[in-house]
Amino acid sequence: MTEIIVSGMRPTGRLHLGHYHGVLKNWLRLQDEAECYFFVADWHALTTHYETTQGISEAVWDLLIEWLAVGVDPDKSVLFIQSHVPQHAELALLLGMLTPLSWLERVPTFKDQQEKLRERDLATFGFLGYPLLMTADILLYDAHKVPVGADQVAHLEISRELARRFNSFYGRDADAAAQVEKGMQAMGKRAAKTFTSLQRRFQQNGDGLAVTEAAAFLGQQAGLSAGMCEQLLAHLEGKGREILREPQALLTAASKMPGLDGQKMSKSYGNTISLREAPEVVQKKIRTMPTDPARVARTDPGTPEKCPVWALHQVYSGPETQAWVRSGCTTAGIGCLDCKQPVIEAVLAEQAPIRERAEYWAARPEQLQEIAHAGAQRARQRAEQTLERVRAAMGLAHEQRHL
Ligand code: TRP
Ligand code: SF4
């Protein structure tokens, strides 16, 4: 079975090489293996930038352009804009009914960001609900896995807890009870008695071992399908039937992409090379990068390990060039500008096809919109299936009931 992957990015300005080497290369791999939904989280951008929203549309299209430019492929992945799929809002609203305030208040990013972004008033309902909206984004597509950075793991934990809470409230329908009844009959009286006593051990005495024993026990019963065993076990644990899938975090390996100053490349450090940086600017940024501070004069030998340029060679150069750097640097055989040249060339070579494709898409806004609209249509169809289940589970399938 192909796995379902969901991920989003907020439209908050141009991407840089750190995004490419960290997040996007990962997406490129995933789109060949799984059913991927990648979306521009424009509503999420509003949670912090609700006062000044000009520029958001431009950022939305820019982000799509950059995804396409690096090779995210609309024939493989479903690419769309969050606000084009109102189902995200409906699910967020419905999940909000059962979301304890305390869960949202205790998310670390809630307090952190409020303190960090002091110039903005983030004591808003929308900002508090950030993880809730994100949960809707994910559960709407029955995602198995969600590629995220470490900063998003707490949000994903909320998504998992909410799915579980939803299932325990609404997954106990008459159908599930009938299934359990059928399973008990299929295993016979004696086995059913053993099963019931294991259930009591777990539910009354909190004996976790009883679950393990029950799993083994059910596995031995002839005439029980694997699905039935699973359902009986869920019943034993007091869990509801799974209506919403619990997603898993697929932690994006911490970006190894160093910035111009040797720290991790990040907008907040001001040490980035943007994905579509003009070649002259790339050249200038790398030429003026700091090097090993001990290498004051050209004749001073240096230590590559103390130099941010060396960190870039790790990403962009093969063993031969690296050996050339090491011996040249430690013997003062090469100057720092010589050393930087292969990095400049490698970055430019990496960016050339990306820049070319970005220009192609930037010149074709209608085609870009078509891609986004087709993606939204597919996303809405998929999302609607989940919502139908959710509405029915929550007692909102009024027409059906009336007929
Ligand atoms: N919160 C994510 C970020 O800032 C963006 C996002 C919104 C997201 N919804 C999502 C990521 C759903 C994964 C899945 O990076
Ligand atoms: Fe850094 Fe290269 Fe200069 Fe050595 S030669 S200090 S590695 S830039």
Image (cartoon, rainbow, N blue to C red):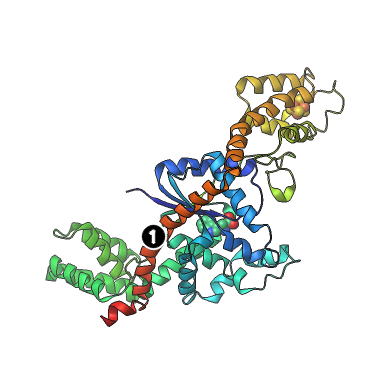
Q: Badge 1: how crowded within 10 Å, few (<14), some, or many (20+)? A: few
Q: Residue furthest top?
A: 333
Identity of the residue drawn at 78% across and 25% down = 337
Q: Is mark 1 within 8 Å of ligand 1?
A: no
**Most foreground residue, 234 or 116:** 116
Q: Tell me: residue 284, above or below residue 227.
A: above
**Most foreground residue, 386 or 242:** 386
In the picture of the structure, the residue carrying the numbered disc 1 is: 381
Q: Residue furthest bottom?
A: 402
Identity of the residue drawn at 75% across and 40% down = 261
Give the total number of marks visible in the rendering.
Answer: 1
Q: Position of residue 372 (x, y in %)?
A: 50, 52
Q: Position of residue 176 (x, y in %)?
A: 25, 71
Q: From where the camera sits, is residue 153 visible?
A: no
* Residue 321, picture quadrant: top right
Q: From where the camera sits, is residue 27 visible?
A: yes
Q: Residue furthest right?
A: 297
At label 1, the amino acid type is Gln
Relative placement, left or right, of 250 versus 306 is left
Quadrant of ligand 1: it is bottom right
Q: Tell me: residue 178, above or below residue 112.
A: below
Tell me the quarter of the image containing the C terminus: bottom left
Identity of the residue drawn at 58% across and 63% down = 43
Relative placement, left or right, of 55 versus 208 is right
**Most foreground residue, 193 or 399:** 399
Q: Position of residue 124 (x, y in %)?
A: 64, 73
Identity of the residue drawn at 41% across and 68% down = 164
Q: Position of residue 284 (x, y in %)?
A: 78, 33
Q: Secondary structure at mark 1?
A: helix
Relative placement, left or right, of 324 versus 239 is right
